[in-house]
Image (cartoon, rainbow, N blue to C red):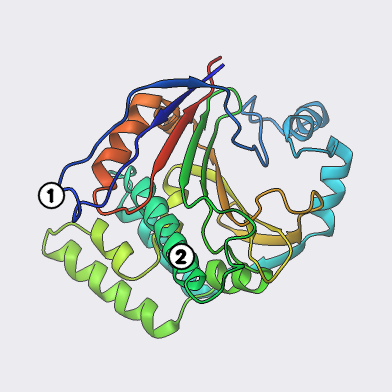
Amino acid sequence: MRALWVLGLCCVLLTFGSVRADDEVDVDGTVEEDLGKSREGSRTDDEVVQREEEAIQLDGLNASQIRELREKSEKFAFQAEVNRMMKLIINSLYKNKEIFLRELISNASDALDKIRLISLTDENALAGNEELTVKIKCDKEKNLLHVTDTGVGMTREELVKNLGTIAKSGTSEFLNKMTEAQEDGQSTSELIGQFGVGFYSAFLVADKVIVTSKHNNDTQHIWESDSNEFSVIADPRGNTLGRGTTITLVLKEEASDYLELDTIKNLVKKYSQFINFPIYVWSSKI
């Protein structure tokens, strides 16, 4: 049995700044799990490698099929500007890691706003999933944190472009602003949202990030990265999302606190004052 916390956060503009949390409701959790990774050991002998591979879960595929899937996936190098930016984010915000959730929720809200706007002129836009929500699932057993939205989703091309490249001019301005803020002793955490690079803050707490996304104009794809390079491949399971995006974080050992239900609830309340969509939080009980 999983505990479902319906936070039902409303836009602060409509509620005079108040954030409402609904009563706890016990239901069977239904959030889908995409990929997993065992935290056991750091050795690289054959036995450990085999255990790691067997621990990875992708519904409908066994360990050898998952290995084959990763071998066939198209590999990409991050643009040099993205590498520089990620290093700067990690080095400058390591004391304020919690902002990763703020950025992922903000991105989810943007995706929901986009599909809602599209639906005003396209009656079929919401056919894949009429819900407009954000769902967060803490999976202590597999050391995974999932953030799922039913927003516009991303095509394969958008996964490569949006998550692997950034305008060189934007990078230069971002680096300059970050440097100025550090020299002036000001907070740098707000800058990553202003420059649209908040997604990369996920690597503050994650060893690996997996993005599963379904756009109305494309099949479902999986983007995966350990911050050194990334890969993209068509999801062999087909369309499991209906529409939208699931971001799965394989958390670092020192980031295990972000699998605690109370921690996530408090962060959601803290960072979701201007979100127009309901946010649901699950926690696997082990």
Say what secondary structure mark 2 lies in.
Answer: helix
Q: Residue at x 73, y 64 (%)?
A: 75
Question: Disc 2 marks which amino acid?
Answer: Arg
- Report x, y in % for residue 179: 23, 69
Q: Is residue 269 left or right of residue 28?
A: left
Image quarter hosting the N terminus:
top right
The outermost residue toward the bottom is 169
Q: Nearer the viewer, residue 146 or 18?
A: 18
| Up/down of 17 relative to 117, above or below | above
Q: Quadrant of residue 216?
A: bottom right
Q: State how far apart marks 1 and 2 are (Cα).
A: 23 Å
Q: Is residue 149 left or right of residue 15?
A: right
Q: Quadrant of residue 126?
A: bottom right
The crowd level at tag 2 (other Cα within 10 Å; few <14, some 14-19, many 20+) is: some
Badge 1 is on which residue?
A: 16
Q: Nearer the viewer, residue 4 or 95?
A: 4
Say what secondary structure mark 1 lies in.
Answer: loop
- Report x, y in % for residue 50: 81, 31
Q: Which mark is residue 124?
A: none
- Report x, y in % for residue 96: 28, 45
Badge 2 is on which residue?
A: 116
